[in-house]
Amino acid sequence: MPASLAPGIEIGVVRRNERVAPDVRLLTFAAPGIARSYRPGTFVHLRTGDSSTPLRRPFSIARVAGDEVILLFRVIGAGTGWLGACEPGDRIDAAGPLGTPFTLVPASRRVFLVAGGLGLAPLLGLADELRATGGVENVDALFGVRTEDEIPGPGLIDPPGGPIWRIASDDGSAGFTGTVVDLLEERLGEMAANGGEDSLSGLTVYASGPVPMLEAAAGVAAARGVDLQVSMEAHMACGVGACRACGIVAWKDRARINGRVCREGPVFDASEILWEEVGR
Ligand SMILES: Cc1cc2nc3c(=O)[nH]c(=O)nc-3n(C[C@H](O)[C@H](O)[C@H](O)COP(=O)(O)OP(=O)(O)OC[C@H]3O[C@@H](n4cnc5c(N)ncnc54)[C@H](O)[C@@H]3O)c2cc1C
Ligand code: FES
């Protein structure tokens, strides 16, 4: 994985804050320094509120456009409530970009993007990058929701020239019926049946979503022998590797190491994670 990026703190200025699904918002703020240093998979650590809420909140950068940073988030508590109420012109204290980004593979290689719920966020920017580097015809983009209502409004997931996201819904209300990992398994099975197991060699899967989904994706990737990079989440405090609040046990060179989601992650090679110990 590439080295972690040096963080900076910037006062961003909110440009837009739109509702795109129930309790889900797309927040756009101008932060030229963060936008310039962004790489897919990195995150920002935001002060959400005044000094009475000292702990910052982490959010994947969903995409950048010029000097703008775009976040996709669900309102679930005080910090996200504060962010959800921001209006154009409001200021946001943002640290970032932080963390270790996705490792990009050459545009000629076949790639799967596998998003579960708001795990979609970091994969949107990765899809933009793949479009910009000309590898889009080699991309299978899969997006899982519980039900159709959770699909964000038009324009967000299928920008012109980008990969077309195939939907999987748990309840069958949209697209494939089942989880997004079921859909991944089916697609890999079809590829192996049509082109032989060799057709899967060199394939990379990028996944982001809840831990059980990522653990299931890790099982499928291991069974098929394909590379999988996962974007992990954890409760964070400092966001820069100092406090170890975001610990994760991983394997490196056959030894257990105590990793940090904010520093060595949030992107990890799935085969390096001790899944049975994540979040327990
Ligand atoms: C690297 C990273 C990237 C993230 N990217 C996004 C994103 O793109 N979009 C998005 O909506 N959210 C994202 N999150 C989660 C986001 O940080 C939390 O939703 C946010 O901090 C909640 O703040 P709050 O003050 O509103 O909620 P709080 O009042 O702090 O918590 C409300 C509830 O949510 C739970 N919770 C809070 N943070 C987390 C967490 N990190 N993991 C699991 N449960 C949590 C709490 O235990 C509590 O039950 C990301 C987290 C990490 C670590
Ligand atoms: S949040 Fe402090 S080390 Fe990761």
Image: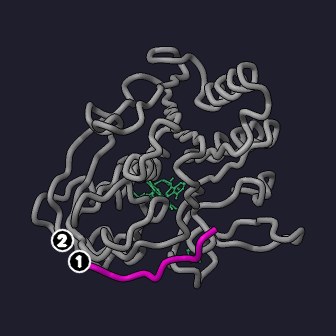
CA distance for labels 1 and 2? 6 Å
Magenta region: 1-11
Residue 87 image offset from top left, x and y in percent: 13, 58
Residue 70 image offset from top left, x and y in percent: 29, 56
Q: Amino acid at mark 1?
A: Ile
- The label shown at residue 195 is none
Which residue bears the numbered disc 1? Answer: 11
Residue 63 image offset from top left, x and y in percent: 34, 55
Q: Main secondary structure of the magenta part?
A: loop
Near mark 2 (Cα within 10 A), the count class, few <14, some 14-19 or many ≥20, is some
Q: Amino acid at mark 2?
A: Arg
Q: Residue at x 60, y 21 (%)?
A: 178
Magenta-colored stretch includes residue 278: no
Which residue bears the numbered disc 2? Answer: 91
Q: Are marks 1 and 2 in contact (CB under 8 Å)?
A: yes
Q: Residue at x 58, y 85 (%)?
A: 242
Near mark 1 (Cα within 10 A), the count class, few <14, some 14-19 or many ≥20, is some
Residue 45 image offset from top left, x and y in percent: 40, 70
